[in-house]
Image (cartoon, helix red, strand yellow):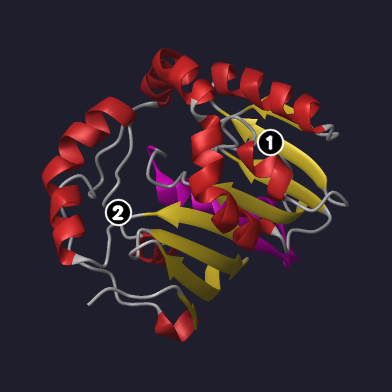
Amino acid sequence: MARSDHETDAAGASPDPPLRPGASGRAKTVEEIRDVYADQIDLLARTDWLNRLFSGRYRRRAFARATGRVLDVACGMGTNARYVPPTAEYVGIDVSPDMLREARAELDRIGRDGEVREMDAQDLDFPDDSFDTVISSLSTCTFPGPVAALNEMNRVCDPDGRVLLLEHGRSDVDLVARYQDWRADAHFEKHACRWNQEPLAVVAESDLQVERAWSAALGIITGIEARPG
């Protein structure tokens, strides 16, 4: 039975599931990820409106509570910037210069002040406790080392701050999940994305402490609010 759009506290998180095809430690290098986005950037830019149409409500729900100085890890084309409250100070980082070019254009387009920088999520060039809020969307599926990236988010977030994540993963609907498993390797090779991961299981391996989580879209979308551990 599919899980409906609902919210749970940390106690509601399920134990780590067994690894599935495409959901193991397999990863592309940072250079390979840059190449993937260089090849796909034109298509991604043309279809960003469709991305916002589908994911906008989830991004708004996940990031509306961001406050203070906000770091957007793996900011991509800057899609999250319009969903972060205008009173917040926005800083975006990504490994892809092509993505960052689009992110800078997006900030200009929506009239938002902000900074974007090329940087590896697994080795953030910021001091400890630099940000009041750290956000990231649809990213742990791509990071070569997702736990390392999450631990860096943990490190640069103020102890009293929050890490807000919007992730996608394996559906709660068996037929959809089996399709994801079947196509996992091909999807990974083309998009550098482990689309049948279990987001809460990935976060559970990091230093972050999950406070609440919610799911939507047949369990494919997971929103997570965590505090630094």
Percent coordinates x, y for residue 45 in the rendering: 53, 22
Pointers 2 and 1 in contact (CB under 8 A)? no
Quarter occupied by residue 201? bottom left
Residue type of the residue flagged with mark 2: Gln
- At label 2, counting other C-alpha atoms closer than 10 Å, the crowd grade (few under 14, some 14-19, many 20 or more) is many
Which quarter of the figure is the C terminus placed in?
A: bottom right
Q: Is residue 46 left or right of residue 66?
A: left
Question: Is residue 5 visible to the viewer in this orientation of the structure?
Answer: yes
Query: How far apart are the alpha carbons under marks 2 and 1?
Result: 24 Å
Percent coordinates x, y for residue 188 in the rendering: 25, 34
Question: Does the magenta portion include 74?
Answer: no
Q: What is the span of residues highlighted in magenta in the rendered image?
A: 144-163
What kind of element bears circle 1?
strand
What kind of element bears circle 2?
loop
Which quarter of the figure is the N terminus placed in?
A: bottom left
Q: Residue furthest bottom?
A: 11
Kindly identify which residue carries mark 1: 92
Viewer-closest of 56 and 162: 56
Identified at 33% across, 32% down, the residue is 192
- At label 1, counting other C-alpha atoms closer than 10 Å, the crowd grade (few under 14, some 14-19, many 20 or more) is many
Residue type of the residue flagged with mark 1: Gly
Identified at 42% across, 26% down, the residue is 30
Question: Does the magenta portion include 152?
Answer: yes
Kindly identify which residue carries mark 2: 197
Percent coordinates x, y for residue 221 in the rendering: 42, 59
Above or below, 95 against 173 in this view is above
Q: Earlier in the sequence, mark 2 or mark 1?
A: 1
Above or below, 56 against 202 in this view is above
Percent coordinates x, y for residue 219 in the rendering: 35, 65
Question: Is residue 130 visible to the viewer in this orientation of the structure?
Answer: no
Viewer-closest of 153 and 102: 102
Quarter occupied by residue 198? bottom left
